[in-house]
Image: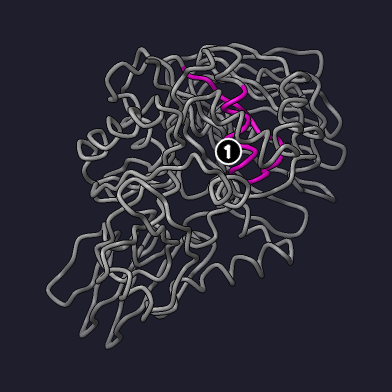
Amino acid sequence: MTIVPVIISGGSGSRLWPLSRSGHPKPYVKLPDASTLIGKTYSRAADIPGVSSIMTVTNESHYFLAADCYEETGKTGMKNIYLLEGTGRNTAAAIAAATVYAERNIGPDAILLILPADHLIADPDALNRSLSEATNLAEKRSIVTFGITPENAETGYGYIEIDGNDVVRFVEKPDRETAEQYVQGGKHVWNSGMFCFRADVMLEEMKKHCPDVLEAVEKTYEASEPQTDSRGVFLRLDKDLFGSSPSISIDYALMEKTSKIACVSTQCGWSDIGSWTALGALFDEDANGNRATGEVISVDARNCIIDAETRLVGLVGVEDLIIVDTADALLVARKDKAQQVTTVFEKLRSSGHEAAMLHRTVHRPWGTYTVLEEGDRFKIKRIVVKPGQRLSLQSHHHRSEHWVVVSGTAKIVNGDNEIILITNQSTYIPCGNKHRLENPGILPLVLIEVQSGEYLGEDDIVRYEDIYGRS
């Protein structure tokens, strides 16, 4: 039996704004223990006995974030397979892509274990025991969903009514009274979004219940060429063909229709960290019920959640608040309104506000840049390039740049010249010049970039060569 964990990493991160953004969503947010949710998911998958390959379906722009998080876990020896979406089409298309790849490259009898990237499991051993039951059912041609035995009357989760391993029906998020009845009755479990199935069985059922999804994905696969780099195998899914798939969840597309579904119940300390109250539960608690991370001083404050990312935060005489302070955005909300944070995010996104997409510090495949200050016709950045990495060969139509090396060694292409700069040395990049920055050393390269010009947007880049496939 070949088990292939499939980590599904999508979504916009709206419920944990402003810590989570579209360009840096929930799975990649640093937790209080300095780990990430996607890193924890990868570690759990790597620890499953017999697993040698792990597949990840994620947005193309998040590929390097996932790979960095995986390296940080210290788990080695895995074959990593990345299916990269140019556009997100929900979980049905993502799971179809993973299943088609597995059926054609690993085998029709491969057992896929679908794991959302942003879930927290406090007891992985309990989940592995449930996995044993699930794989046995999958071998008998069932499509298995994992149900979480409810610990309280949670209204933010969908439920599944069960009879042993049989699924009676799926239930949408209930009101408080109905949720309490579900918990007391003992016949309902939380819908975890984790699944286990044979590749050939899933494809048979997709062909029957959501053929339009499967057809689009199969055409995408035929038009997409696998590539290999130092981090594994990756397949960039053709953006137009993959985008032609309906955007629909796997529950609606298949799980609620198939007769082959089964459910395995588990108590594994599961949480989808779907709100600030859930994330805040991971912070240390003081004598007044406040949970905080960062530098916080509270006076007569009770039952608050505080994330002080960059500055000292002081609280006086307040109760039941969520306070999240980042470099460019501040959130203040009542704890009982935690689910409405997504409304703020959606307003920012619909207006095109940058705070919905990116932080002041932006992660790129080669490292990071942080906007230190900007104003009329100027912008100042701190750029960090990882050892052995380099930016694309590029030019700009509307801006010139000054680079000053703070630490490390910079190898720079500037027009027809190639130069090496060390600490306290600088160069000027005229508008229109082709240029590239590279770190040839073994330590991070840190430099300050001063941009000047009539337009300083990030889209003023013409790429000629790029080792990350962005040209």
For the C terminus, which image quadrant? top right
Image coordinates for residue 22, horizontal then vertical, percent: 60, 51
Report the residue at 27% width, 37% height from top.
Answer: 130
Q: Nearer the viewer, residue 423 or 377?
A: 377
Can you say whether 212 is above or below 55 in the image?
below
Q: Nearer the viewer, residue 469 or 59?
A: 59
Q: Secondary structure at mark 1?
A: strand
Q: Residue lying farthest bottom? A: 317
State which quadrant residue 61 falls in: top right
Magenta stretch, residue numbers: 80-100
Can you say whether 111 is above or below 88 in the image?
above
For label 1, the crowd category at 10 Å Cα-Cα, with few meaning under 14, some 14 to 19 and many 20 or more, is many
- Please indicate whether residue 426 sits to the left or right of residue 305 in the image: right
Report the residue at 74% width, 66% height from top.
Answer: 351
Q: Is residue 445 magenta?
A: no
Q: Nearer the viewer, residue 207 or 21?
A: 207
- Please indicate whether residue 106 sits to the left or right of residue 205 in the image: left
Image coordinates for residue 363, horizontal then vertical, percent: 55, 39
Coloring scheme of the render? Answer: one colour
Image coordinates for residue 389, horizontal then vertical, percent: 56, 19
Q: Nearer the viewer, residue 456 or 182?
A: 182
Can you say whether 72 is above or below 130 in the image?
above
Report the residue at 45% width, 14% height from top.
Answer: 79
For the N terminus, which image quadrant? top left
Q: Is there any visible trace of residue 430 in the rendered image?
A: yes
Q: Is there any visible trace of residue 360 in the rendered image?
A: no
For disc 1, the marked residue is 448
